[in-house]
Structures are given as C-alpha cells and as structure tokens.
Image (cartoon, rainbow, N blue to C red):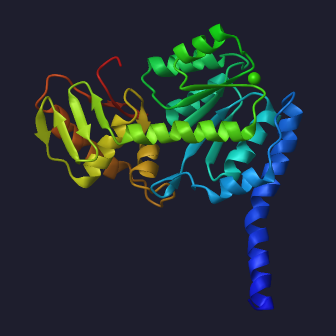
Amino acid sequence: MSARAADILQLSTEQSASPCGTAFHSALAGFRGAAANPSPISVQSCWEWEAGTRHKMGNRSMRVLIVEDEEKMADALRHGLEADHYSVSVAHTGEEGFYLVSTEAYDLVILDWLLPGRDGIEVLTQLRQRGVSVPVLLLTAKDATEDRVRGLDAGADDYLVKPFAFPELLARTRALLRRGIAETTNRLTVADLEMDVAAHKVKRGGRDLALTAREFDLLEYLLRQPGRVVSREMLARDVWKESARYTPLDNVIDVHIARLRRKLDDQSDKTLLRTVRGVGFVLGEDGS
Ligand code: CA
C-alpha cells in the first residue's frame, strides 16, 4: 500500500469513528450526571453501532420520540440515538409528549414514567385508549414487580429500569423496532376493512377494492394509525414525501381522500374514513 493510500485509510478510519465517539462521550458525560451508577460503555460498542444497520425504513431514518423531564438524561439519550442514526424528537412533559404522539408519526416512543403533570402511565393509558399502537419503551426508577406489571398492563411494550446501560437501551430499541417492522408486514384491519400489504390487496366486507398505487399508500398510512387524526402536513411528508414545497398539496390530498372514501365507504353502512374539520382525517369506526 502506498504511503498516500495508507494516509487516506487512516484518515477515513478516524473520520468514521470520531463523530460517534464525540457524540457518544458527550452523551455519556451527561448520562453520568443524570444516573447514579451507569454501567461503562466501551468505544468498541460505539463502533459496532456505527457499523451496524442504519435504522432506516425504506429511505428514511426511524423516528424516535423521547419523553423525559430530566434534561441531562433527555440530552444524553438524544445524542446517543442520533449517533446511531435515529431521527430524534424530545418532549419534556407528559402533555407535550401526548400532543406530539397524537400529531406526528413515530416508530418508537421512549417514555419516562415520572413526569411533572400527566405522568408516563397516564399518557400511555390515554394513547392506547385512543388506539395509538406505536411501540413504547417505558423508563422508570420503579423496580418492584407490581410496578413492572402496572407499566406493561398500561400498554408498554418493554420496560427499562434506571439506571441502565445505554447499549441495553439501544438493543431494546432495535428489538422493538424489529417487532414493529415484522408486524407492519402483516395484515392491517379496521372493522371489516382488511389490507394485505405484501399481496397489495384491500377488501371491505369481503369485497375486493381496486385502488391506485397512491390510494393504497394513503390507506396503508391511515390503517397504521387507526383512530388517530392524521393531518394534511403528515400526509404530504410521509405519503407524498414532500414537506418543503412551494404550493400546498392540500387540494391534491383532498381529491385523493375523496376518491378513497368513495371506494371504501360508498357501498357500506358504516363510514370509516372521516374528515375532522380544520385538522385532518381519521380512519376508524365512529367513536374509536
Ligand atoms: Ca422523570
């Protein structure tokens, strides 16, 4: 190998390792301040995260929401997850977290139990009551069996007791997201509406529906968040993949929604796709 090639190799190795190391170490510094006795994390494991999957679904980063009132802990989690290529948002109160989960699409929510105002359990219970099925990893200092049971019964998918080692949080995050992705390949149903995503087929009351590719994508997006109000901004960003645009897509979206509604609901007694004035659209049985 020439000296020049060796220099370039050395440089590229340093460059690929350093962003993770920097983010990781600054995150760890904050983490140490927040947790009483965190387990040490090796730089080796940081490289392994870098070398691992990019945590992407299609061509977008997986979106994680952290709901945590302790700022140092929230910052440490955010930096660590961003270094691992997640797209991260942070809420510092239960109210803010509830609002964000209700209005934005996330692949995973990391939810602290003890929050000022509405606590994590209340937020989780209400989200599940409203049919929001996003995977939730509950963080807490409560370690008693009855607390774990209470957390899981409220609708948490997993539970991590503070203080914890960051690699364990990453491993649990990956496991929950894998489970989520596996579930997303299955059939999606709301009332008598069924979608087979792999076979690209949709039925309502046993009757086949012929949808265009865009209508199918739109319906799949709505079916993944049953009972939840989906805004035009969310549809523009996640279905049309256009968030920064000069002319609003609202009319285009409304036309597609109207066509989809005719195909879904015209031959059925029950309306499933409804407009929420001034907010967006919701797919689900009335009252769900
Ligand atoms: Ca807290």
Vertical placement of residue 155 versus 216, above or below: above
Q: Residue at x 12, y 40 (%)?
A: 208
Vertical placement of residue 58 versus 12, above or below: above
Q: Residue at x 64, y 59 (%)?
A: 51
Q: Residue at x 71, y 15 (%)?
A: 143
Which quadrant is home to the N terminus? bottom right
Residue 261: x and y in percent read 22, 37
In the image, 74 versus 264, the foreground residue is 74
Q: Residue at x 81, y 45 (%)?
A: 27
Which quadrant is home to the C terminus? top left
Q: Most extreme residue toward the top, as rendered?
A: 146
Residue 139: x and y in percent read 68, 25
Residue 28: x and y in percent read 83, 43
In the image, 230 versus 255, the foreground residue is 230
- Left or right of 68 on screen, residue 71: right
Residue 13: image quadrant is: bottom right
Q: Most extreme residue toward the front, as rendered?
A: 1
Q: Most extreme residue toward the bottom, as rendered?
A: 2
- Left or right of 154 on screen, residue 25: right
Vertical placement of residue 269 versus 135, above or below: above
Q: Is residue 106 in sight in this rendering?
A: no
Residue 32: x and y in percent read 87, 36
- Left or right of 86 on screen, residue 251: left
- Left or right of 255 on screen, residue 278: right
In the image, 235 versus 35, the foreground residue is 35
Q: Count the marks.
A: 0
Q: Is residue 207 in sight in this rendering?
A: yes
Query: Can you tell me which quadrant of the image ligand 1 is in?
Result: top right
Residue 226: image quadrant is: top left
